[in-house]
Image (cartoon, rainbow, N blue to C red):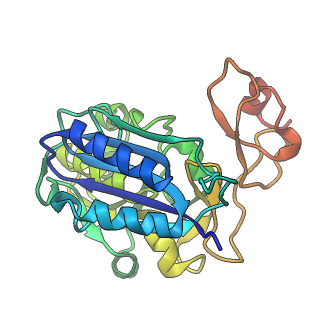
Amino acid sequence: MATPKIVLFYAFAPLADPEAIRLWQRDLGEALGLRGRLIISKDGVNGTLGGDLPALKKWVRSFRSYPAFKDVDIKWSEGTGLDVDGLSVDFPKLSVKVRDEIVSFGAPGELRVDEHGVVGGGARLSPDALHDLVQARDDVVFFDGRNALEAEIGRFRGAIVPDTETTRDFVELLDSGAYDDLKGKPVVTYCTGGIRCEVLSSLMTARGFGEVYQLEGGIVRYGERFGDDGLWDGSLYVFDKRGSVDFSDHTAVIGTCAGCGAQTKRTANCPDAACRRQFVVCESCDAVPCDEHATGPA
């Protein structure tokens, strides 16, 4: 029986020939019938792939055979299904591209990477170490390293959620001094699988934030460890057809429909073709114009 799976992964490492890596990953993915997205740069690789379990296992063995990727953390989750050709229905195609950044903060000149990963990033905290820190300190600040929309359906309790539509907004917000009051506190950055916080924590450290941490493995690894019985509330937004994933059978619904105010974890694109925004919106309000989404229920 076919077993649809999805893998999420990244690796920061100096790559002498990103184009060669792109061709290898494109050919390998096509040969194994995988779909998904990979971004490659001189600083590493970032991706998510969907396919049948045996094919993904073969991909993992090949991917880890490259020295720079041998210790990469592969995060597994359930896929929605496979089509009649055995291809993942969670992605429309396989896309493998070379970019200036593997995660787009718009600051490629600031990122420094060596054979050990990002230079100058925040101290890593395992999920258990995070709990230890929270128990030992009463001034811990959770800082969401995702786009604000993602945090609407799930976030760490009491977290600061910057008003960001894209990852590029973080640099401007940090440079504005909007969060300078946090420079004397322990700040724990978190994101989906950890990659955005690798960069964000290094940007914060470079700007004088004295005690910066990053949640190792991101929300994904935290959810695997504590489910919905820890410090996390709600669903995890994901960038594929699934839309979101839950960590237990008692996940709280914390999102609020932009149209009617009902509780929902559903997100959807604005029905106006000229609008590129997404909203948290229930199925009943899916066709509500974006101006009504923006104002919310009366």
Q: Quadrant of residue 81?
A: bottom right
Where residue 282 appears, as percent x and y from the top left, is 81, 47
Q: Quadrant of residue 283?
A: top right
Q: Between residue 50 and residue 75, name the one nearer to us.
A: 50
Q: Residue at x 56, y 53 (%)?
A: 238
Q: Between residue 134 and residue 272, name the one nearer to us.
A: 272
Residue that sits furthest to the top in the current view:
274
Determine whether 183 is above or below 136 in the image.
above
Q: How many marks?
A: 0
Residue 145 visible to an observer of this rendering = no
Where residue 243 appears, as percent x and y from the top left, is 64, 51
Name the side, left or right, on which 232 lies relative to 172: right
Determine whether 62 is above or below 23 in the image.
below
Q: Residue at x 52, y 80 (%)?
A: 226
Q: Quadrant of the C terminus?
A: top right
Where residue 12 appears, as percent x and y from the top left, is 23, 53
Name the side, left or right, on which 28 lies relative to 113: right
Q: Residue at x 56, y 51 (%)?
A: 151
Determine whether 108 is above or below 221 in the image.
above
Q: Quadrant of residue 104?
A: top left
Residue that sits furthest to the right in the current view:
284
Q: Residue at x 85, y 39 (%)?
A: 285
Q: Between residue 136 and residue 88, name the one nearer to us.
A: 88
Q: Quadrant of the N terminus?
A: bottom right
Q: Between residue 171 and residue 218, name the one nearer to us.
A: 218
Where residue 213 appears, as percent x and y from the top left, is 29, 63
Residue 52 visible to an observer of this rendering = yes
Name the side, left or right, on which 25 lies relative to 296: left
